[in-house]
Structures are given as C-alpha cells and as structure tokens.
C-alpha cells in the first residue's frame, strides 16, 4: 500500500542536474558575482572594495561615456535597418522572381561566414587610399572617403558591414513568417480593391508581426553585445570614436582594470535587460491584440 | 513567370552580385595573387596565379598553426556538442513533460542565457580558481553553458509534438524514467538534434570572442584566432591572409550546402509562434 502512495513521477527533476550544474558554474556564478566585482578595485592580484567608483568613472570619463552612447547608436541603427531591409528583401524573394532560391542563398550566406574574416575583408576594401571601394568612387569621379579613418564615420561604416552580414538572417526569419500568411487575406484585400501598397501595409505588416518581434529582439541583443566585427575593423578607433561597451570591456581587461571591465559588463547587462524585456513584452502584447 | 518577375529577377541578381558576390570574389582573387600583387588591394585578376603556393605557405606558417587550430576547434566543437545534446535534451524533456513552478523557473533561467552577456572577467577568475583557464576542457564547458538556452528552447518545442502516449506505454511496461528517455524519446529527437548540431557547431566554430578571453596561448589557438595572429605577422602579405579567410570559410560553406534545410529550421524557430 505504501508503495503506491509515494509513486514517483516518471519525469524526475534530477534530469535537469547535469545541464544545471554546467550552466550554474560557468554562467550563473560569474554573472551573479559580477555585481560584487564591479564594486571593487580588482586586478590580477587582489580585489578591494571600491563602492560605486567604477560606475562613477564609467559615466564621467569621456571615452567610456562615448562607448556607452556608441553601443546604443550602433544597436538601434543596425536593428532598424535589418528589420526594414529584411522585410523588403523577404517580400521580394517570395514574389516568384527569376533565380529566387539562388538569391536567398546568396543573401543568407554571409551569416555563416567568420565575422573576423568579414571584418578584415571590408577593412581592406575600405582602405582610405587603395581600398577597392575608394578606387570605385575615384573611377566614378567622386572623392575618396575615409570610411574607417574618419572619426565621425567609422562607427557607421562598421554598422553598414554589420547590416550586410546580418540582413540575411532577418530575411530568412521574415520569409518563414510570410509563409504563414494565407493567400485568402490577399484575395479578400484585392476584392475590396486594395492596391499592392495597401496590401503590404494592411495585410503583410500586421500579420508578419511575430517575425518582426523575433528580428527586432535578436538584432537588438546582437547589436548591443557586438564585439568581434568592431575589433577586426577598427579596434574601437580612430581614438575612441568607434568604441562600444564590448570593446571597452576587453580593453580594460587587457589593461588590468578588472573591476572597471566588470562594471562595463554589468552596465551592458542592465542595458539589455531594461531595453529588451519591455520591448519584447510590448511587441508580443500587440501581436495578441491584432 | 511573368515578364515583370523576370525583369525584377534579373535586376535583383545584378544587385546581389555587386553587393554580396563581389566581396567573396575579392577574397578568392587575392588569395591567388603574389604578395606584391595583393598589396595593391584592387579588384583585378592576378598577374600570376599562385593558388597552390599560397595554400601551402599559409598552412605551413608558424609551424602549421592552422592545422593545430583546426584540431583544437574540432575538439571543442565535438566535445561541446556531445554534452549539449545529451544534457540539453534531458532538460527540454522534463520542462515540457512536467509543468510545475520548478520547471518554469528552470526554463526561464535557461532562456536568460540567450539574452544576458557573459560576465567575462569573473568567468576567467572562476576558470583560474578551478584550474580550467587556458584548457580545451574549460572551453568545452563554457561553450556548452552558452549554447544551453538555444538547445533547451528547440528541444522543448520539438518534444511537445511527440505524443505522451509513447512514454506512458513504456512506463506501463515497467521502464525506468531514464530508460523511457534514452530508449523511447531520444531516438525520436533526431531531426531537431540535427538542426541543433548544425546551427550550434557553426556558432562554436565561428566563435572568436570567447576563445580570445578564455583560451589564450599559442598551443591553444583556434580557427578564428588564426586570422588575428596572422594579420600582425604578415602586415604586407595580404594574399596569405585572404587564403586563410578562404580556408576557414570552407567548413561552414560545406555545411550550408548539405544542411540548408536544418539551418533554415533552426534559425527561424520562434519566428512563427513569436
């Protein structure tokens, strides 16, 4: 009798333990302890309590402030462009064009290529005097541009390359989203006399919203965390003009300012949490309303 | 196909050629030039075609560093994937089959890994204190932890499509929980497992940032870092640098050709249900 009363679930919790142990030790413990270490003067030898000093420094040193602002500019710019271009490309590439499946592969392939490889390639193509892009501009009789050497342009040049590299993923997600919209919606709209333009705004855009949510959130998180492309193309330069939080974290770590580096990590974490969580909630809510 | 679709298609093909194909041609052509020729950085055919010499020189550079890097990257990728698939599937299974406050928390914590940037310096401190800093084993466990969110997400939604009656039949036959999972459920997870392996192994193979932090040292070089070391050594030898880019792009290209469907499935998961 006792045996039946304490019947065990066929889905025991201990199944979670192996993954849980790895995840806790290698991800959760460092994440939680980063809040403490960000409040210390920390170098390879010792950690002394410092109060808010690292954060005060982060928001008073001009080059650190620049990195924080650049992170936001970069993430919103690339996320916005990937969303808009991704949707337009997806509509184009589902309209039954000549060479459609080949085009999809071509647009998507950069997503799978080494980011550092892409960075080095474009760094050479954007060389201020000899780069292929500037030779092209010169051939058209246009002035040469210091894509990566002009401090006011460097961040935007890297952002354009990031869009080039990532728009394929946005397109792919939108193509999957468009496939779920039934033809009957478009037929009904046509019968009501809607133009192609109206069909796009009144049918496609609202009904593809789950895909939009995914694209916006994924590309925003990716943009806020981006390190490798910036590192390969500008190293944060010229000066600190294209530094972002991720490159500041790396530089401060290399310089031995571990506490400051970790404060940068915490700021990045808070930035993502405060921007992405409300945005995801808002986009999902609207999807249910629609 | 209407005339409009053909015309628009031709236009799109032309645009795609300029924007997406030319950069890759640039890599290919420069990888086949002599050092002097490639240093011009222009878009032209090689004066002399030296593909083979460049290939051999690139591989031999720094005592065959590229081959060592390939070996290290393969060890890390295979090790992390094996751990991820087995442990991640177990979590996805329990989270999907046994809805409770405990599993809801487990699932949310796993998903938080998709969003939260890893705290790099505290991770280095931790790896040092348990003796795993600068080791392949440490890197394998790190990649496993960082890939857990995606893996659990995909397994959970796939397991929802497998009827519970299958588990129940096995339970009535007297199977233990681990037997139900490993003998009945796991074999049915092949399609989603393939998707996870394809997407995650490309991610791990292409990872530059985390080996840079957690795996410094010449003997620990991974594939993406070969470019980085290479660039400082051969300031003028652009041809070898581009050959190196070419050589590390080949594995993802092969995977893309053979597993296109899995890549699409993996990367668009979540797009439809939101």
Image (cartoon, rainbow, N blue to C red):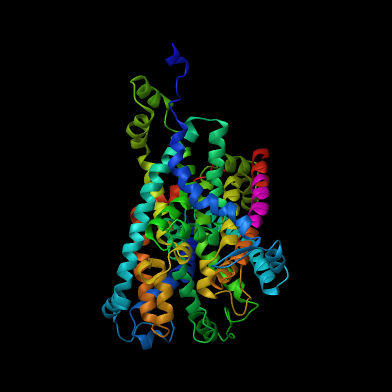
Residue nearer the viewer, A99 or A110: A110
Rendered image quadrant of residue B274: top right
* Horizontal side, residue A5 vs residue B69: left or right: right
- Quadrant location of the N terminus of chain B in the rendered image: bottom left
Q: Indicate the position of residue A271 as horizontal and vertical percent values.
A: 66, 57
Whether residue B122 is visible, yes or no, is yes
Give how far across and how far down residue B245 sits, in percent: 39, 71
The image position of residue A242, as x and y in percent, is 61, 73
Q: Main secondary structure of the magenta part?
A: helix
The residue sitting at 58% across, 43% down in the picture is A186
Q: Please name whichever residue, B27 or A245, is drawn nearer the observer in this view of the structure.
A: A245
Within the magenta stretch, is there residue B190? no
Q: Residue furthest top?
A: A1
Q: Report how many numbered discs are placed on residues in the image.
A: 0
Q: From this viewpoint, is residue A182 visible?
A: no
Say left or right for A207 vs B39.
Answer: right
Q: Position of residue A123 (x, y in %)?
A: 50, 77
Note whether A62 is above or below B46 in the view shown: above
Picture quarter containing residue B66? bottom left
Residue A236, compared with residue A186, is above or below; it is below
Q: Which residues are magenta?
A: A269-281
Residue at 45% of width from left, 39% of height from top? Answer: A17
Query: Could you say which is closer to the camera, residue A193 or residue B166?
Result: B166
Left-right relation of A122 to A270: left
Magenta stretch: residue A270 in it?
Answer: yes
Camera-side residue: A108 or B145? B145
């Amino acid at each position: 009798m006792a045996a039946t009363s304490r019947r065990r679930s066929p889905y025991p919790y201990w199944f979670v333990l192996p993954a849980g142990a790895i995840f806790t030790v290698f991800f959760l413990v460092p994440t939680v302890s980063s809040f403490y270490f960000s409040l210390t003067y920390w170098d390879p030898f010792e950690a002394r309590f410092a109060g808010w000093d690292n954060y005060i420094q982060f928001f008073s040193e001009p080059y650190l402030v620049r990195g924080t602002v650049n992170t936001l500019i970069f993430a919103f710019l690339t996320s916005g462009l990937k969303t808009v271009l991704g949707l337009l490309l997806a509509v184009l590439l589902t309209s039954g064009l000549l060479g459609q499946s080949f085009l999809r592969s071509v647009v998507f392939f950069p997503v799978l290529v080494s980011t550092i490889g892409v960075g080095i390639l474009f760094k050479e193509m954007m060389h201020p005097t000899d780069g292929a892009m500037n030779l092209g501009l010169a051939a058209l009789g246009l002035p040469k541009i210091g894509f990566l050497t002009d401090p006011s342009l460097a961040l935007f040049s890297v952002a354009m390359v990031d869009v080039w590299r990532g728009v394929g993923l946005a397109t792919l997600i939108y193509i999957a989203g468009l496939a779920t919209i039934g033809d009957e919606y478009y037929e009904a709209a046509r019968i009501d006399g809607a133009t192609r333009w109206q069909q796009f705004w009144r049918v496609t855009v609202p009904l593809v919203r789950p895909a939009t949510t995914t694209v916006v959130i994924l590309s925003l998180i990716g943009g806020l965390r981006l390190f490798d492309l910036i590192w390969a193309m500008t190293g944060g330069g010229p000066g600190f003009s294209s530094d972002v939080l991720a490159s500041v974290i790396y530089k401060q770590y290399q310089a031995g300012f571990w506490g400051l580096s970790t404060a940068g990590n915490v700021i990045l974490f808070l930035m993502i949490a405060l921007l992405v969580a409300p945005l995801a909630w808002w986009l999902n809510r609207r999807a249910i309303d629609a | 196909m209407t005339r409009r679709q053909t015309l628009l298609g031709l236009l799109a093909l032309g645009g795609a050629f300029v924007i997406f194909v030319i950069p890759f041609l640039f890599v290919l052509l420069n990888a086949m030039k002599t050092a002097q020729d490639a240093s011009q950085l222009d878009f032209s055919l090689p004066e002399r075609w030296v593909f083979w010499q460049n290939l051999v020189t690139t591989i031999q550079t720094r005592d065959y560093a590229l081959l060592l890097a390939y070996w290290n990257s393969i060890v890390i990728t295979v090790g992390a994937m094996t751990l991820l698939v087995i442990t991640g599937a177990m979590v996805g299974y329990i989270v999907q089959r046994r809805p409770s406050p405990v599993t809801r928390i487990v699932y949310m914590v796993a998903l938080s890994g998709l969003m939260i940037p890893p705290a790099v310096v505290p991770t280095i401190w931790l790896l040092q204190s348990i003796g795993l800093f600068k080791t392949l084993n440490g890197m394998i466990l790190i990649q496993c932890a960082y890939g857990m969110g995606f893996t659990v997400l995909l397994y959970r939604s796939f397991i929802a499509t497998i009827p519970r009656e299958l588990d129940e039949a096995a339970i009535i036959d007297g199977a233990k929980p681990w037997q139900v999972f490993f003998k009945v459920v796991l074999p049915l997870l092949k399609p989603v497992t393939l998707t996870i392996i394809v997407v995650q192994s490309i991610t791990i193979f292409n990872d530059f940032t985390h080996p840079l932090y957690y795996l410094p040292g010449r003997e620990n070089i991974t594939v993406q870092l070969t470019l980085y070391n290479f660039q400082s050594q051969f300031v003028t030898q652009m041809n070898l640098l581009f050959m190196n880019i070419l050589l590390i792009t080949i594995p993802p290209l092969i995977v893309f050709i053979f597993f296109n469907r899995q890549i699409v499935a993996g990367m668009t998961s979540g797009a439809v249900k939101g």
